[in-house]
């Protein structure tokens, strides 16, 4: 009997995505994988920290996503950083293509996870933040944290 994967089991998260980019929309995409890649993902051996997505020839591709070689694989093991085709609806690919036409806009993989036994990747459409924007975001975050601490201390 086949083992069913939990419905939303996270494999890898790009923690710097929201820090480096202002994310406006997100899209859930499927991935075309080889057998040994699926086994490595089930073992949780993946990283999307350096990854990016592009639209080439009307198809969506994921580059620089590292899925470690399957340790029990044989000579037919997969290439760890090969490009992988992403599966999305035509109208979503069109929206992503239109978004990335302007300078400074990119497609950022934000999360790699299991959904109903299939590997999915969450792609965000983002605009790169400048250093000033990053500092402002950090200052807002710190101020919010201080307010929460003060309220918590006051309630005691």
Image (tube, rainbow, N blue to C red):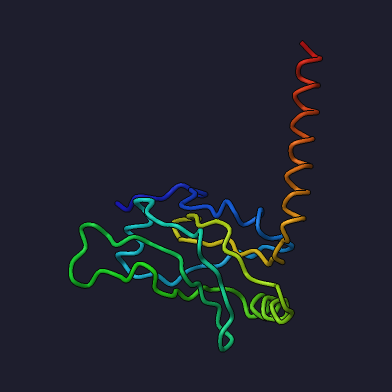
**Residue at 57% across / 63% down in the picture?**
109
Q: Please give left or right for residue 143 compared with residue 44 in the image.
A: right
Residue 21, image x, y percentages: 68, 60
Residue 132, image x, y percentages: 76, 55
Residue 122, image x, y percentages: 58, 61
**Hey, which residue is sitting farthest top in the picture?**
156
Residue 43, image x, y percentages: 34, 51
Q: Is residue 138 above or below residue 153?
A: below
Tell me the quadrant of the picture where the C terminus can be found.
top right
**Residue at 56% across / 72% down in the picture?**
53
**Residue at 66% across / 54% down in the picture?**
18
Task: Using the rendered view, name the quadrant where residue 84 is placed.
Answer: bottom left
Q: How many marks?
A: 0
Q: Nearer the viewer, residue 39 or 124?
A: 124
**Hey, which residue is sitting farthest left in the picture?**
74
**Residue at 45% across / 65% down in the picture?**
65
Q: Nearer the viewer, residue 82 or 113?
A: 82
Q: Is residue 40 above or below residue 83?
A: above
Q: Please give left or right for residue 74 compared with residue 10 in the image.
A: left
Task: Using the rendered view, name the quadrant where residue 90 is placed.
Answer: bottom right
């Amino acid at each position: 009997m086949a083992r069913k994967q939990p419905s939303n089991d996270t494999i890898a998260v790009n923690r710097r995505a929201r820090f480096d980019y202002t994310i406006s929309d997100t899209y859930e995409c499927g991935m075309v994988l080889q057998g040994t890649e699926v086994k490595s993902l089930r073992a949780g051996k993946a990283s999307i920290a350096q990854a990016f997505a592009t639209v080439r020839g009307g198809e969506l591709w994921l580059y620089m996503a590292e899925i470690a070689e399957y340790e029990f694989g044989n000579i037919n093991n997969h290439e760890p950083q090969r490009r992988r085709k992403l599966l999305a609806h035509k109208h979503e690919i069109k929206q992503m293509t239109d978004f990335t036409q302007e300078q400074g806009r990119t497609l950022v993989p934000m999360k790699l996870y299991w959904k109903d036994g299939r590997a999915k990747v969450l792609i965000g459409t983002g605009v790169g933040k400048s250093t000033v924007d990053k500092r402002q975001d950090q200052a807002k975050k710190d101020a919010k944290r201080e307010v929460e601490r003060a309220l918590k201390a006051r309630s005691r």
